[in-house]
Amino acid sequence: MTKIEPLGAVRERVTTELRQEIIAGSLRPGDRLVERELAERFGVSRVPVREAIRALVAEGFVHFETPRRTVVRRLTPTDVKELFELREALEVYAAGLAASRATPEDLAEVQGLIDRAAAATEAEDAEAITDVNSRLHDRIVAMAGNSLLTEALEPVAGRLRWMTRRNEEWPQLLVEHRELYEAIASGDPDRARAHALTHVRTNYRSTVRHLFGDEELP
C-alpha cells in the first residue's frame, strides 16, 4: 500500500523547499508563485501549497502583490537596516552571555563549525558556507543560555540567512568568525561583545553593497 503523507508534513516539506529555493536564489525577488504550477511540480494538491505560501508570507519571504498575484519579496535597504539593527541588539548581547556561560563542550562544537566553514570556504561552496555560518550563529545564541533571546531571533532567522547569502566575501567572514570565537573562548564578555558588534556592522555593510551597491551604504 502507498503510504499517505499527512497534510501537515506535506505543507512543511513544500514550505521548506520553497524557502530554500528563495534563500539560494533559484527563486528570485519578483518571481511569481503560482499555486497550480507549484502543486504540479511538487506532486501535491493545491491546499498544502496555499498554506506554504501563507507561511512564507508570514516569514517575510513572499508577499501578495495583488489578491491574485504572489511574488518573492524584493528586499529594500530599509528591510536590511532593520534586520541588522535587530541582530546588533540581540546577537551582541548573546555573545557577551556566551563568553560568560560557554562550556568546553560548547566551545569545541563552535570550533568544529569553524573548521567546517573553512573547508566550505576553501571549496567555494556557497550553500555549505551559508548553512554552517547560520549554524554557528545559532550555536552562539544557544550558548547564551537565554530561551527568550533564542525565541526573539527565531522569526527572522530565515530572512537573515536570505540576506547574508548574498554576501560572498567568504574569506573575510571566516576571519571574523574565528576572531569572534576566540573572543568568546577568552571568557571576557566585553571583548566578545566588541567583536560581535564589529562583525554585525561589517556584515551589514557587505550585505548592502552586494544587494544595492555602494550608493546605499551609510
Image (cartoon, rainbow, N blue to C red):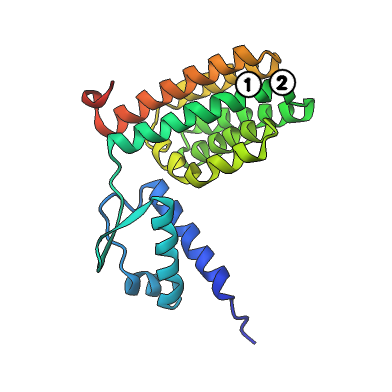
| Identity of the residue drawn at 32% across and 29% down | 208
- The crowd level at tag 1 (other Cα within 10 Å; few <14, some 14-19, many 20+) is many
- The x, y position of residue 188, in whole percent, is 67, 13
Which residue type does callout 2 highlight? Answer: Ser
Which residue type does callout 1 highlight? Answer: Gly
| Identity of the residue drawn at 39% across and 38% down | 163
In the image: residue 112, left or right of residue 133: right
Quarter of the figure with residue 182: top right
Where residue 100 is drawn, which disc sits there? 2
| Identity of the residue drawn at 73% across and 30% down | 106
Residue named by callout 1: 96
- The crowd level at tag 2 (other Cα within 10 Å; few <14, some 14-19, many 20+) is some
The one of 25 and 194 positioned closer to us in this rendering: 194
Residue closest to the far front? 148
For the residues bearing labels 1 and 2, Cβ distance under 8 angstroms? yes
The one of 194 and 131 positioned closer to us in this rendering: 194
The one of 173 and 185 positioned closer to us in this rendering: 185
- Asked if residue 122 can be seen in this view, the reply is no
| Identity of the residue drawn at 38% across and 75% down | 40
- The x, y position of residue 52, in whole percent, is 44, 64
- The x, y position of residue 80, in whole percent, is 35, 35
In the rendered view, would you say 23 is above or below 214? below
Where residue 87 is drawn, which disc sits there? none
- The x, y position of residue 78, in whole percent, is 30, 35
